[in-house]
Amino acid sequence: MANLSSSKLKDRTIVFYGAGSMAEAIIRGIVDTGVATPGNITVLNRSNGDRLLELQKKYGVVPALTPEQKDAALARSDMIVLGMKPKDSAAALLTLKPLLRSEQLIVSLIAGLTIQTMHRLLANEQPIVRTMPNTSSSIGLGATGISFSASVPEEGRALALSMFGAIGMTSVVEENLLQTVTAVSGSGPAYIYYMMEAMIRSGIEQGLAPEAARELVVQTVRGAAEMVRLTEEDPAELRRKVTSPNGTTQAAIETLERHGFPEAVSQAMRRCAERAEEMGQAIADEAFAR
Ligand SMILES: NC(=O)C1=CN([C@@H]2O[C@H](COP(=O)(O)OP(=O)(O)OC[C@H]3O[C@@H](n4cnc5c(N)ncnc54)[C@H](O)[C@@H]3O)[C@@H](O)[C@H]2O)C=CC1
Ligand SMILES: O=C(O)[C@@H]1CCC=N1
């Protein structure tokens, strides 16, 4: 049993309940940075044992392969990270319910699923940390929005902040703003990748070798993000500095505007947040309709 008086993540037992791509991003981050001990991390899935063995090989974490191993890991761990798909989450919480002790900390990664729905499913006020991380966590550059149920003690807050702080930046927000965090940073990497795909494609169409197009785009995105971060200047100001009057950038930006780029981004983000809400509502509707 881990030392419960210590707030160090290293001393805590953690179960990743659902070991897909987001769980792996976090595992890689906390193992690589050394904030957690691989031997204290158990991974479990619904059915894919090979996936668990792959994670064991890559990170030294412990696979729970049999129903007995799964129940034992869930029952004894200090933290349980819910990393299954939203549609599987209600069933997983109901499975968890009879195994839980009141001091175990639940950390949810699940888009849309509210603390209220989790408390209702568990029929108690279990300490819950609801988060919205992103996959850049796997390289220590994650951005995670975090909310706490009132039942999370100070120590639980510190543990969660150290987990997500080790793999990037964290922002504690009111729970109703986690949908917005989903729209900004949870799904955000995909918008940037989408932009990169389009830029690489156009570079190739205009004659660049694929590798050159890729390298130039990657360095451009990396450099632009670092410029915003290091100079602390407003992105609009940095953009102005690239844009010579009547020059090439102005021509490009005007074209993006004509095609509704800012409005498209705004609508995409609103739809993203709305979708998170819908997904959370769908979980609750399905779980409590019976
Ligand atoms: N992928 C992303 O960028 C982000 C994902 N999330 C959230 O993370 C969660 C997982 O997403 P991904 O990792 O992308 O999905 P994924 O499909 O890669 O992984 C889900 C895993 O959960 C397992 N699983 C499903 N039901 C289970 C059950 N009853 N018991 C045990 N394991 C079960 C599946 O076998 C699978 O390994 C989702 O709820 C999503 O909303 C949050 C932020 C970012
Ligand atoms: O697409 C999704 O639903 C998840 C949540 C945020 C990023 N991926």
Image: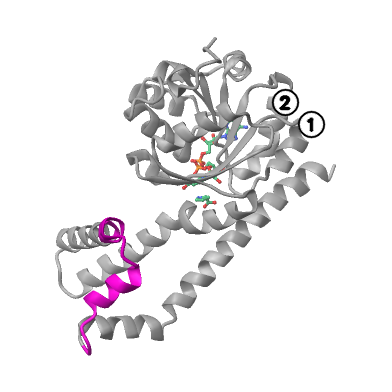
Q: Residue at x 44, y 57 (%)?
A: 188
- The part of the chain drawn in magenta is 225-246
Amino acid type shown at disc 2: Lys
Circle nearer the N terminus (1, 2): 2
Quadrant where the C terminus sits is: top right
Q: Secondary structure at mark 2?
A: helix
Q: Is residue 57 above or below residue 86?
A: above
Q: Secondary structure at mark 1?
A: loop
Q: Is mark 2 within 8 Å of ligand 1?
A: no
Closest to the observer, 9 or 136 = 9
Residue 180 falls in image quadrant:
bottom right
Residue 197 falls in image quadrant:
bottom left
Which residue does the numbered mark 2 point to in the structure image?
97
Which residue does the numbered mark 1 point to in the structure image?
123
Category of crowding for the residue at label 1, using alpha-carbon neighbours closer than 10 angstroms: few (below 14), some (14–19), many (at least 20): few
Say whether residue 49 is magenta.
no
Left or right of 170 in this view: 101: right
**Count of marks overlaid on the render:** 2
Q: Are marks 1 and 2 in contact (CB under 8 Å)?
A: yes
Dominant secondary structure (helix, strand or loop) of the stretch shown in magenta: helix
